[in-house]
Image (spheres, rainbow, N blue to C red):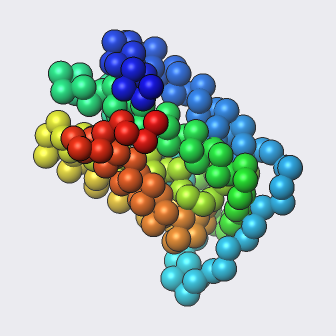
Amino acid sequence: MTKELINQIQRQSRWLMLIVIVVVFCIAYLGTNHLNFIAPHYLPMTNFDKMIPFLPWTVFIYLSAFLMVGAAVLLFNKKEKDYGRGVFGIIFLLLLQGAVFVVFPTAYPRPLLPADVSWLSHMAYDLLTFIETSRDCFPSDHIAMTVFVSLVLWRRGRLLGGISFFWTILVAISTLTLKQHYIVDVFAGITVAAITYYWLFSSKKRYRIL
């Protein structure tokens, strides 16, 4: 079943699949983000979490993760069928994490914005908090998405993959400095992305889960 779905995606246009990803994102991420069936859990704060400063201006890096995933879809290599597997992986990760967010919602205690924050950062942060609540922390969707697409882009070229991984590191830092995630969320996102990549791109294990 998985192989057939990937082959179907491989034949579709990039812009169509971008629209599909946006729809899935709105349902699996933003939709579950606003559900209140189960009270969210607050995870224990590590000393590392406590020592990270709150830097509201990093909201722009945090939001850039969405642009990064969209750009990656346009750059996935169609000749090696990285495109079909890459797009399928993004959708799979969104749905998998959406299920986790419903069953085990977690939240991060958001701090108040400092008085000296710039108006532009204030506006961007207000937009973010309007779209996203403090729920759906574990695992980090931002990290899972950016790590996964970076792994796929690395297959196309070291320069492209290197730029993508550098961008991913900045996004990972921003999830902490913006106080959107615990450090454990970051590692969980990396783990989920790595497992998904191995499943879809390992020649021996490919497609055997579904």
Residue at image x 42%, y 29%?
2
Q: Position of residue 205 (x, y in %)?
A: 29, 44
Q: Is residue 112 visible?
A: no
Residue 36 on image: x %, y %: 85, 49
Q: Is residue 191 above or below residue 183?
A: above
Residue located at (58% from left, 48% from top): 97
Task: Specify whether residue 63 is in view.
Answer: yes
Quarter of the image that includes the N terminus: top left
Residue at horizontal 78 percent and vertical 61 percent from the top: 40
Q: Quadrant of residue 53?
A: bottom right
Observer-nearest residue: 160 or 57? Answer: 160
In this image, 143 relative to 204: left or right? right
Residue farthest bottom in this picture: 47
Residue 167 lies, in percent from the top left, at 33, 51
Q: Is residue 28 above or below residue 107?
A: above
Does residue 199 appear left or right of residue 41 in this picture?
Answer: left
- Marks counted in the figure total 0
Q: Between residue 200 and residue 123, name the one nearer to us.
A: 200
- Quick one: 70 or 11, which is closer to the camera? 11
Q: Quadrant of residue 98?
A: top right
* In the depicted structure, whether residue 146 falls above or below residue 48: above
In the image, residue 177 lies at what x, y percent?
52, 67
Residue at the location (51% across, 82% down)? 48
- Compared across the picture, whether 1 is left or right of 133 comes to left
Q: Quadrant of residue 107?
A: bottom right
